[in-house]
Image: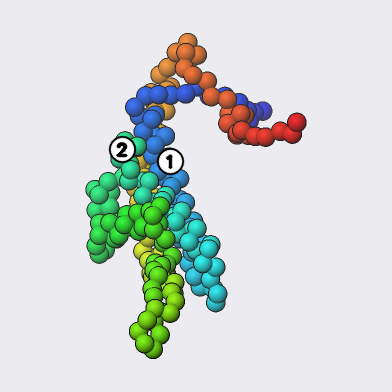
Amino acid sequence: MATTPETPTSVRELNTPAALELAELTAVLDDLHTVLRCCERLLADLARQEPDDLVIEALWSTALLSYNRCFTTDVRSAALTEADLEATSLRGEVTEWHAVLGKLCEHYTNPAANPRERFSVGAARDEHGAASGIAITSIPQPRLDETTVQQTGALAYQLTQQVERRIAERQAQVHAATAALTSAELDQLPRIDLTAAEHGPGLADG
């Protein structure tokens, strides 16, 4: 009778260059999936008769941050590059759109600027030209449109396919290298408790 293998409760951490790159690629893929999920939600919210501006800003900011993180080469050695943009099957100015998304990310994360409106204060004058009071004015920033979201989602989808292929290649490489390790060599590697990792940190009363 065939038996189902038990789910391991712990694994041994691999710190080879290929394993570290695999972990980084997985993080990149997770960010791209987040971009896609945000774009799907945004399109649904923008199609509503009265879109929730707060929800739209939260989703769009998350999408921009997640996308930008995929190209942060000073943190991830496996970060995406312009070569990955050029390798997509999308037509048009892909690298230019990528640059636009980078500027939008800076706009939404600038701690000194309001991404929704630009405020200013002016002096009101009476019929004699004398100051009679002040007025606070605001100029709304351009609203997010469906085309912007669709183009961002299309680019993220193309990049996702590239990263998935890269992950499959690295998985095969890491698996082959791990299979060659002896039991003694595996015992020397750091242990990762999967049960603790699954539950994560928590709070308790008292």
Quadrant of the image occupied by residue 199 = top right
Q: Position of residue 76 (x, y in %)?
A: 34, 37
Q: CA distance from mark 1 to mark 2?
A: 15 Å
Q: Look at the picture and state if 89 lies above or below 187.
A: below
Q: Quadrant of the N terminus?
A: top right
Residue receiving disc 2: 74
* Residue that lies at the very extreme toward the right in this rendered image: 206
Q: Alpha-carbon neighbours of circle 1 within 10 Å: few (<14), some, or many (≥20)?
A: some
> What residue is at 39 percent from the left and 39 percent from the top?
25
Q: How many marks?
A: 2
Describe residue 181's horizontal placement relative to residue 205 as left or right.
Answer: left
Q: How is the image coloured?
A: rainbow
Q: Look at the picture and state if 10 lies above or below 205.
A: above
Residue type at mark 2 is: Asp
In this view of the protein, which residue sits in the foreground, 23 or 138?
138
Q: Look at the picture and state if 15 lies above or below 128.
A: above
- Residue 204 seen in the current view: yes
Q: Earlier in the sequence, mark 1 or mark 2?
A: 1
Q: Position of residue 121 (x, y in %)?
A: 40, 70
In this view of the protein, which residue sits in the foreground, 86 or 66?
66
Q: Tell me, for residue 27, which label it has, or none.
A: 1
Describe residue 177's horizontal placement relative to residue 59 as left or right.
Answer: left
